[in-house]
Image: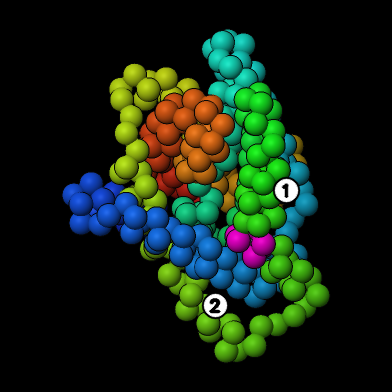
Amino acid sequence: MIAFILLSLPIFGVVALGWAAVWMRFAKPEAIDILGAFSFRFALPALVFRLIVSQPFGHSFNPAFFGGYLASGAVIFALVLGFSRFAGRQPLAAAGAHATTATVSNLGFLGPPLMLTFFGERGAGPLAMAILCEVMILLSIGGVIMGVSRGKSAGIGTLLLRGTVLNPVVAAIVLGAVLAAVGVSLPAPLDRFLSFLGGSAGPTALFALGGALAVQHIDRATVVAASGITVAKLLIYPLLVWYVLAQLLHIEPLWIAAGVVMATLPSAGVNYVVAQRYEADADRVSAAIVLSTIVSVATVPLVAWLMLG
């Protein structure tokens, strides 16, 4: 257990450094935005693309994992949506935002450094498929629910296009998969360029994540209200992923461990962006993102120890 905590500490330490830099005003929020844009649009796509292309196609894509992980996320999405809508008496837009926050993980910023730390380059395949499940499908469904219930259907198409097809990380996954499937090898200069650019993905993404958390203002009442979403995200979701992948599908242990660890990651910042866009309880979504990120400092190494130790 101590070993996994020590492996995770540098990763979350950079997040804390980014938070401290903005909170102590050593870095301006505008600078964090630029750093986050660089990481998301250039460094992360380069990292993911190179990792996928450099491995045999079968190592990166597993249909059983994709189906099981997506089914698990869909079940949690439906449960949180129904509970928030009917038991919590929330508007449909807010319920959709809660369901999205409980299922769309921070795979873009936290995913690559954690997966590479725990699984090496073999972690690229599960990471890519999880991004497709959560970003392309679950986030899209959540956006539709929020947009339609708010009567802003005119902006849904643009939002979903930017979040899926035009998402640089998703585009890198698709292109890398195509090249891996046909057996194309990258020229040495291009491979070195992508390696150099992708090497900056982890630190810049984590620092930007910490800085983004520092500018979110939440109160104690909102945190209490967001606790249910955090429990669904960090506890129920990983347990269901483990049950489906290990007990029902019996897939390879590496894929099981990778799926459970990714499901344990905190909620993604994009959930707040979408909720704010559709006026769908953005304050509670923001609180859930911050709370789940804080709690995941302990839960991620614990789950990694349970699955790999």
Q: Residues within 10 Å of mark 1 (few under 14, many from 20)?
A: some
First along the sequence among labels 1 and 2: 1
Q: Work out whether residue 96 or residue 82 is closer to the camera in this orientation and state it.
A: 96
Label 1 – label 2 distance at C-alpha: 27 Å
The color scheme shown is rainbow
Q: Position of residue 155 (x, y in %)?
A: 65, 39
What kind of residue is marked 2? Leu
Q: Which mark is residue 204?
A: none
Q: Which residues are magenta?
A: 168-173
Q: Position of residue 302 (x, y in %)?
A: 42, 43
Answer whether residue 22 is visible to the viewer in this image: yes
Q: Work out whether residue 229 or residue 62 is closer to the camera in this orientation and state it.
A: 229
Is 103 situated above or below 259?
A: above
What kind of residue is marked 1? Phe
Residue drawn at (51%, 77%) of the image: 195
Q: Position of residue 295 (x, y in %)?
A: 38, 36
Q: Residues within 10 Å of mark 2 (few under 14, many from 20)?
A: many
Between label 1 and label 2, give the one nearer the viewer. Answer: 2
Answer whether residue 229 is visible to the viewer in this image: no
Q: Which residue is mark 1?
A: 66
Residue drawn at (60%, 60%) of the image: 169
Is 42 situated above or below 19?
A: below
Q: Position of residue 53 (x, y in %)?
A: 67, 73
Specify whether 222 is left or right of 121.
left
Q: Secondary structure at mark 1?
A: helix
Specify whether 260 is left or right of 266.
right
Q: Work out whether residue 185 or residue 7 is closer to the camera in this orientation and state it.
A: 185
Q: Which residue is mark 2?
A: 194
